[in-house]
Amino acid sequence: MPEGHSVHRIARQFARNFVGRPVAASSPQGRFAEGAALLNGREALTAQAVGKQMFVEFDGELWLRVHLGLYGAWDFAGEIFTDPTIASANGRMGQTNQRGTVLDDEPVWDAAGENSLTSIGAPRRSRVHVRMSEQTRGLADEGPEWPPPVVGQVRLRLLTEITCADLRGPTACEVQTPDEMLGTLAKLGPDPLVGDPAEGEERFTAAVRRKRTPIGLLLMDQSVVSGIGNVYRAELLFRARLNPHTPGKDVPEEVVRGLWRDWAGLLRVGVETGQMMTMDGLGPEEYRKALASRDDRHWVYHRTGLPCRVCGTAIVMEEAAARKLYWCPRCQA
DNA sequence: ACGGCATGTCCAA
DNA sequence: TGGACCTGCCGTG
C-alpha cells in the first residue's frame, strides 16, 4: 500500500538495476502475456516515478506504466545494486505488513549470508533473497536458483542477467506509446520530486484555491497533487492545524503553500528512509521508538479515540469519500 | 479455516 | 455512492 515515497524508491531500484540492460519480460500468471511479449528483450532506458505511478522506458518507444494500487508489490531478487539515495536494498517494495513494519526496510542478506543493513552512502551489491511470506522464506533457504522459482501470482517478471523483479497484484500494468504516456502524465498533479518544485507549488496552489472541494479531499486528488495517500493526507492536515472540511478556496494562500512545502519535505524523508515518519521534534530515543512501532509514528493517523499528542482531545475518524480520515477536532478546529 | 482489513482507483447506477 | 478489483496478513474462533 504505497504512497508516493515507496514508488520513488522502487523507481530508483529500477534505475540502478535495470536501466542500461536488456530485459527479459514474461507474465508467469498470464494476465500480462501480450505486454510482456512486447517488452521482452528490449533495453530499459529510464525509470521514473510520478506520484504513485512508475514509468519504465524501453527502446523502441515503449513505456511500461505500473500502479500498485492497494495490494501491489515488487519483489526483487538476485544481485541488487543499492541506490545510494535510499537507505537499504530490499527484497520487497511497496507492501507493508499489517503490523505496519515497512518491508522496504527489511534487512538484506548479503552474499556471505550475513544479515546486514545497508546505510546511506556508497552503493553496494547485496544478494537478496528476502520475501516476507513463510512460503518464500522456505524457498530462499534452498540455495541459489536462477532464475528464482515463481511463487504465487506474478503478473510481470522482469529479468536481467543478474537481477529479477516480480510484480504482483497491481491495479495497473500496461505498455504505453509515448503519446499515451504523455496523456497519463498530463492528468497528474505536480510531484515535488519531478520537475521544478517552485512550478509545482504554483500549480498546486492555483488548483487548490480554485475549488470549493474540502481540502481533505483535494490532498488525495492525484490531479491536484501527486503521491499523497491516506496517511500523508491526515498527517499533513494535522501538521498545518487545518480542518479537513475547509473548502480549498478558503485556505489562506500561505497555508496552501505551506502544505506543498511540507509535503515536499515529508516525501524527501520518506524516499530516503523508506519510512512514513510524519512527526518531528523527537529526540534520538523517541525517534528510535517511533520507528520501531508504527503506532508511534503519526500525529493522528490510525489513532481514533486516542488522546491528541498536542492537546489531549480524542482523535476522531470519519469516512470521507470511502476513505478513513483521522483528525483532531480541537487542534484542527 | 475464515473473515476483515489495508498506505488505491475506476466505473456503473 | 456503492461495488469491484487485486493480494497478504492478522485476529478470531
Image (spheres, coloured by chain):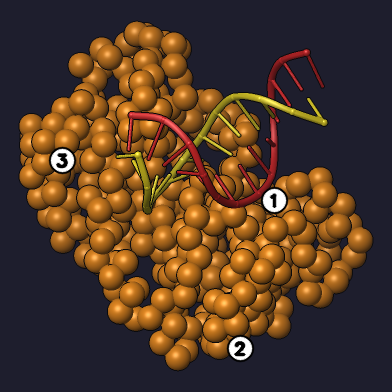
Chain colours: A orange, B yellow, C red
Q: In this view, does A280 lie above or below A276?
A: above
Residue drawn at the location 77% of the way across and 59% of the way down:
A151
Residue indicated by mark 3: A256
Q: Which is more toward the observer, A199 or A147?
A: A147
Q: In this view, does A98 lie above or below A106?
A: above
Residue indicated by mark 2: A41
Mark 3 vs 1, N-terminal side: 1
Point out the residue furthest to the right here. Answer: A142
In space, the residues marked 2 and 1 are separated at their CA atoms by 32 Å
Mark 3 vs 2, N-terminal side: 2
For marks 3 and 2, give the one nearer the viewer: 2
Q: Which is more toward the observer, A23 or A259?
A: A23
Could you tell me how many numbered marks the image carries? 3
For marks 2 and 1, give the one nearer the viewer: 2
- The label on residue A107 is 1
The answer to whether any part of residue A239 appears in the image is no
